Image (tube, rainbow, N blue to C red):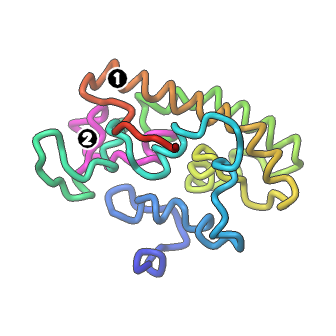
Amino acid sequence: MELLNQAPQHLPHTNCRKGSYIHIARDDLQRRDLFKPAQYLRSHLDQLPLFRLRTQATSYIPSHLHLTNDHTYTPYNQRYCPSCLPIQIVCNEPHTFLHCSHSSPLSHPAILSITRALRRYDLCSWSSHILLQQTVIFLGSSPPKLLLKHNKAWTHSTSTTCTQLIYSLQSHFSKHQPSASPGPVLSLI
Ligand SMILES: [Zn+2]
């Protein structure tokens, strides 16, 4: 919770721990129904890709890896994007989805689809959302200002988009970082 108090109101620095999921999910953690499972878990859709990403259980986003393949610990601010090296940029969700010139083009179909969904619900445009809000939407949460009564319908109409984005990222990283797998075997059962 300490990180919550430290979280700044502006965009996170990409080279510090404030880009971690606790920061990304800050608004989600303040929802009134916090002790209800997140809406994406209450749908019948394919939940595992979002679950892995939201619990930081992937091996293709370096900021998720507590230990490297040789079991050494890398400080958070040195978990660099391998695609962007020698430029040293912490590789977390916002970088992977929206900034990295190697992986962010994969987000374009999802952006188009979410742009249409935002229009359907009469919400602000995609580009008017800040980086963290865009990241949170990719992670299956509702956009800010969506009416509570539309949460379920939003999840229903965008989950497949988010899941497809994650699958295309997995496939991209498995080609470019052969050691990257979707993550440890998990079971929701
Ligand atoms: Zn990169």
Q: Amino acid at mark 1?
A: Ser
Residue 87, labelled with which disc? 2
Tell me where residue 172 appears, x and y as whole percent: 41, 23
| Residue at image mark 1 | 174
Q: Residues within 10 Å of mark 1 (few under 14, many from 20)?
A: some
Q: Tell me the kind of residue under disc 2.
A: Ile
* Rendering coords of residue 21 (x, y %): 45, 58
Q: Is residue 171 magenta?
A: no
| Residue 164, numbered circle | none
Q: Nearer the viewer, residue 73 or 134?
A: 73
Badge 2: residue crowd in 10 Å (few <14, some 14–19, many ≥20): few
Left of 138 or right of it: where is 18?
Answer: left
Q: Position of residue 120 (x, y in %)?
A: 88, 41
Do tag 1 and tag 2 residues touch (Cβ < 8 Å)?
Answer: no
Q: Quadrant of residue 117?
A: top right
Q: Check the picture and name the quadrant holding the N terminus.
A: bottom left
The residue carrying mark 1 has its beta carbon less than 8 Å from ligand 1: no
Please indicate whether residue 56 sits to the left or right of residue 105 in the image.
left
Q: What's the residue at 39%, 32% (across, down)? A: 182
Query: Which image quadrant is residue 73 in?
Result: bottom left
Placement of 147 over or under 172, stated as above or below: below
Q: Nearer the viewer, mark 1 or mark 2?
A: 1
Residue 83 versus residue 54 in the image, above or below:
above
Going 68% across and 46% down the picture, which residue do you hit? 127
- 141 to 118, vertically: above or below: below
